[in-house]
Amino acid sequence: MARLDHIQCVEDARRAARRRLPRMLFDFIDGAAGEERAGRRNREALDRIELLPRVLVNVETRRIACDLLGRRWNLPFGIAPMGMCDLAWPGADRAFADAARDHSIPHCLSTAASTSLEDCRARAGGNAWFQLYVSAPETGWDLVRRALDAGYEHLVFTVDTPVLSRRRRELRRGFKVPFRLGPSQLLDFALHPRWSLTTLARGVPSFGNNRSHNGPRSGSSSRAFDRSQSRGAVDWAFLDALRERWPHRLVVKGVLSPDDAARIRAAGADAVYVSNHGGRQLDSAPAAIDALPGIRRAVGPDYPVLFDSGVRDGEDVVKAFALGASYVMLGRPFLYAAGAAGRAGVYRIIELLAEETSVALAQIGRTDIGALDERVLAGAGGGAEQAHAFSGDLGLIGSD
Ligand SMILES: Cc1cc2nc3c(=O)[nH]c(=O)nc-3n(C[C@H](O)[C@H](O)[C@H](O)COP(=O)(O)O)c2cc1C
């Protein structure tokens, strides 16, 4: 395990995970579609955005808590849905669920998670969200029913994976689920004995939602997820049906087009989630951050807009809020953290991101993450509003 004081940012965790994990698994996590242009574009676009420092504002007390979808979250970012997280570290999904509960942030459990939705809901309580992939409608409805029975109040319906894209690093490494072990994979595992001893020794993680939670389940639920299955038949009519059947908050994830966003709002979803899947689907997709302002304009100022793809530090979180996000999610950073240092790594990265976000607010003379807009960007006229009234709720109290 990496020493926690050696992890001072997401990139430190990434480097440590790269050393610790077999190359096949690191590349599954770190890789993106095609030539990975969309993955790089996410970073380049975020790096291009500059924030304008403002001075002589009293920023002693800052608020990074946020209200979203019916409740308050202690931090302005949460854990994006990711499949097969326990490949990074055998307790990853459970550590995410526990950290979400302890920090009061959302943990969105994937349909393709290593741990069952019932287990994670029991750990994270109301901080647990469930992400839905639908191949065949009957398995989709079965999952929706399970999520309802388990007590989920937030459903995130992912719509940007009609088919699994070609991720070249995965293909070159022979990454398949379940694993197919040839000589190069065996050598890879042998060269990473710590991972092999902790993970393989406990049995290769599988899809947790394909296992029944309360004894045998009937019919389709026994295979809630199959990575190779197409999800191409899912359409607007399915969204309408889902809206009718899901009585709680419904979020639609993987949206880059303002027209789609407006239609999702009209269909009665409670939020749109702007994302290019971390560059893992369409290599020529725009950077998600570049799509954000247009989507904010399309859905209006008050409609909840979640954002992910490429966020790596607190300044990125601030940039996303400035460009119209109501909430930010991160994916890979939590897997790097779990791969680098297990449960402690996950908690560490949350604390670092929280501190970075609070520090970034102070630097731009702001006290409330929920009150940002484009005026905090350099080149936007620099008219940052001064002296925001403190709303009375605590985020982090800054020192120097
Ligand atoms: C290993 C991995 C698995 C993922 N699995 C899912 C998934 O099962 N469902 C989903 O909606 N998104 C999935 N995603 C996409 C994330 O939810 C998120 O959109 C993306 O990771 C954000 O980009 P970032 O990693 O740069 O933060 C996955 C991402 C990664 C890295």
Image: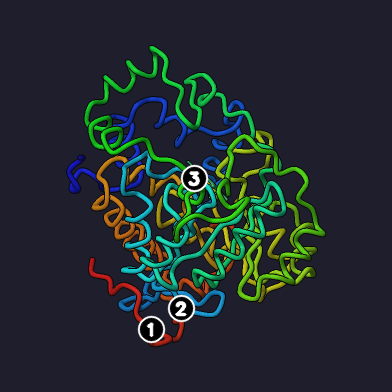
Residue 306 in percent (x, y) is at 58, 62
Of the residues tagged 3 and 2, which is closer to the observer?
3
Residue that appears at 30% across and 56% down = 352
Q: Quadrant of residue 61?
A: bottom left
Q: Earlier in the sequence, mark 1 or mark 2?
A: 2
The way the protein has been coloured in the rendering is rainbow
Q: Quick one: label 1, few (<14), some, or many (20+) residues within 10 Å?
A: some
Numbered label tally: 3
In the structure shown, which secondary structural element does the residue marked by tag 1 occupy? loop
- Would residue 126 be visible to someone looking at this image? yes
Q: Are marks 3 and 1 in contact (CB under 8 Å)?
A: no
Kind of residue indicated by mark 1: Asp
Q: Which residue is mark 1?
A: 393
Say if disc 1 is inside 8 Å of ligand 1.
Answer: no
Residue that appears at 29% across and 36% down = 199
Relative to 262, residue 161 above or below: above
- Would residue 52 be visible to someone looking at this image? no
| 346 horizontally vs 366: left or right | left
Q: Quick one: label 2, few (<14), some, or many (20+) residues within 10 Å?
A: few
Q: Earlier in the sequence, mark 3 or mark 1?
A: 3
In the structure shown, which secondary structural element does the residue marked by tag 2 occupy? strand
Residue 72 is marked as: 2
Name the one closer to the observer, 281 or 35. 281
Residue 101 in percent (x, y) is at 35, 68
Q: Quadrant of residue 260?
A: bottom right
In the structure shown, which secondary structural element does the residue marked by tag 3 occupy? loop
Q: Quadrant of the N terminus?
A: top left
Residue that appears at 62% across and 46% down = 276
Q: Which residue is mark 3?
A: 83
